[in-house]
Amino acid sequence: MSSKDKSGAEPGGPPAGWRGLFGSPGRAPALAVLAMLVIVRALDPAVVQSIRLRGFDFLEQLAPRRYQALPVHIVAIDDKSLAQYGQWPWSRARVAQLVDKIAAGKPSVLGVDIIFAEPDRLSPGRLIDSDPEIPAQIAGELAHLPSHETVLADALRKVPTVLAVAATNALPQARTPSRVTMILESGANPRPFLFAYPGLVHSLPEIEAAERGDGSIDEEADPDGVIRRVPLFVVAEGHLVPNLALEMLRVATGARALGIVSGKEGVQGATLGSNFLPTDRHGRIYPYFTPSYDARYISAADLLNGSYDPARLNGAAVLLGSSALGLSDRDQTPRGLMAGIEIWAQALESMLTGNLLRRPAYLNAVEIAIVLIAGLVVVFALPYENPRMAAAAFLCIVAILFGAALVSFEWSKLLLDGIYPALSSALVFGVMLSENLRVAEAGRRRLAGELQHEREMEARLDGELNAARSIQLGLLPRHFPGPPANREVEVYASIEPARMVGGDLYDFVLLDAEHLSFAIADVSGKGVPAALFMAMTKEVLHTATLRYRNALDRVFNEANDKISAASEELGAGGTNMMFVTVFAGIIDLATGMLVYVNAGHDAPFVMRAGAAPASLPIAGGPPLGTVDDFQYSIEQRQLAPGEMVLAYTDGVTEAQDANKALYSGARLERLIAAAPMTTAKGVVDFVRDDVRRFAAGAEQADDITLLAVRWLGPVTSA
């Protein structure tokens, strides 16, 4: 019974399908890297957040929000104001003058980004306490003057005002309760997801009494120091506190309450009337920033000295704060450095125009899924057998990831991370590509080694074949009988071995002064075995001919027995049994009588000057080594003086040209008919040259062997 089950898997091993799934180069390590990247994204460490946030910055730079003139203005205590009205802090009376100027313009709301937490040292009462040398009359007059806090509070009552508060980790001190904005909660409890602080820093109660609401000015910079998002709510002193921009919006619209919507994954956003303001899960909004523009700013000096018409503030939302260098914080945003007061102005603009960027809590799970899906596509779908195509497909995946992030941003203000999925896919692609290249390189080296081995084996085989060819040719007689030494007969032979050693042979021998024996043979097969079989055949025929002389039938019978035995031994009785075709003859040099036997060989031609060539009539028999105990018979022909017997092997008639066309016996017969009857060598060379011309450009597939024997006639005594 097989050790494998029907699925092809080894018992106790992984199923064949799993091996096919993970067995491709690089898949196992790439999937391990992908799993690690998914886990890292789920844990969301600071470095991953930083990568994501920088990607959001890039989106804001690719598709920036254009600044439009909006009813949001910043009255800035700037360097020009300080130069005209003295260093900060100004007296509360001066600030009250500025607020009066603003109130005269009838804005819809004033947001004050200044916390008046300490009494004014320039207030009349504070001056009396700080300088005992003030004359009593003057001190009495000062005592009847209202405090600067009262003056400022009176000014603030002239305009709907939201005062800034700041979260602090210090415990709250006993104080008069301040105004608390009503916030309606929907869904889950939002407090676990919001930034929480024990206390708040307020303005003095006397000033706070004039306000319409408190707004937090806390900004949470990201780990890289860039402010991209601000809390819409914080938890402080046990209450939900809206930020300055949101509270200004509530006061400007006359709404009595705000709403906060939360779910299991965190805060979803805030409601103001029918408007919904989206946040991330920690209750932070993402303002859609523009670069800082001077058009947003109004110098406090211009209002105070009357060069700016307050009527231009009618119905606008006004923020009052500082922008002077060294006096205000300058924060880095996705669109560059800007004063803290402008960040609140841009947050308010984004709320008014519906341009808050969205980062809902569910995007976290969506992005994890994108990392996983993109990684699996990189692992299983890319054609790594073609690295260039795989790289092009990977670039398409990256383009899709970035394109999806950009389209989501432009069409729906959705902050979808394309950076981390692209980087994750790049790491997985790198693992897959490097592993596939490593395997391909190993395969290339293996193939190069195999090729080198084949070349070495081929070179060794060529050496062996060359040696075998040399041995083969060395066995053949090279000294041909003819005039003047032999005036009765002329013999010439030619053999052109193919690249692969073959089994053609020719032989001749003078048995005595009056008899010449000759033979031509072709062994089946190619290579060294055929050459060895040829050598054995030559030796068997040569020995038997010397023994039996004119009795060629006995020569062939003995040769057939020995060659059959050798064939069975070499072929092990199978289909590889070898045989040999032979034509052999003996000429009586005195009379020209030719006796011959043919064992399956092509019939030779008899040539005579002035006559058409004729094939020797042959009854013949099968090739030697094919039929045991076959009795070969002798045939004879009387040659006339000058007649020539031309024998050949099938390498002549089966020679091919470049188009695989055969030379053929018909072409050979026509050629012989036109051959000049000069000498045996001349006829052999004539035929050989024609075969060469025919097969020019084609590889020689078989040995080409020609043997010519010409009887010149009896020798007469002088």
Image (cartoon, grey):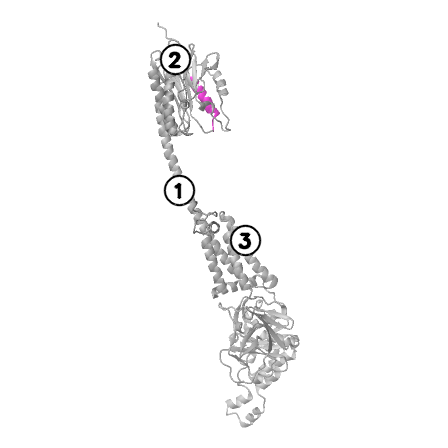
Q: What residue would you read off at disc 1?
A: 449
Nearer-the-camera pick, 125 or 29: 29
Q: x%, y% of residue 562?
A: 36, 23
Query: At 49% across and 58% down in the image, what residue appears?
Result: 424
Where disc 2 sits, the SS reads strand
Q: Residues within 10 Å of mark 3 (few under 14, many from 20)?
A: few
Foreground tag (2 vs 1): 2
Left or right of 301: which side holds 674? left
Whether residue 151 is visible, yes or no, is yes
Task: Farthest residue to the top: give it.
Answer: 718
Task: Farthest residue to the front: give it.
Answer: 1
Query: At 56% across and 91% down in the image, what residue appears?
Result: 142
Query: At 33% across and 19% down in the image, what residue appears?
Result: 543
Question: What's under tag 3, amino acid-wise?
Answer: Cys
Say whether residue 53 is magenta: no
Q: Residues within 10 Å of mark 1 (few under 14, many from 20)?
A: few
Q: Which residues are magenta?
A: 682-697
Q: Which mark is residue 587?
A: 2
Characterize the magenta stretch by its predominant secondary structure: helix
Question: What's under tag 1, amino acid-wise?
Answer: Gly
Q: What residue would you read off at disc 3?
A: 396
Q: Are marks 1 and 3 in contact (CB under 8 Å)?
A: no
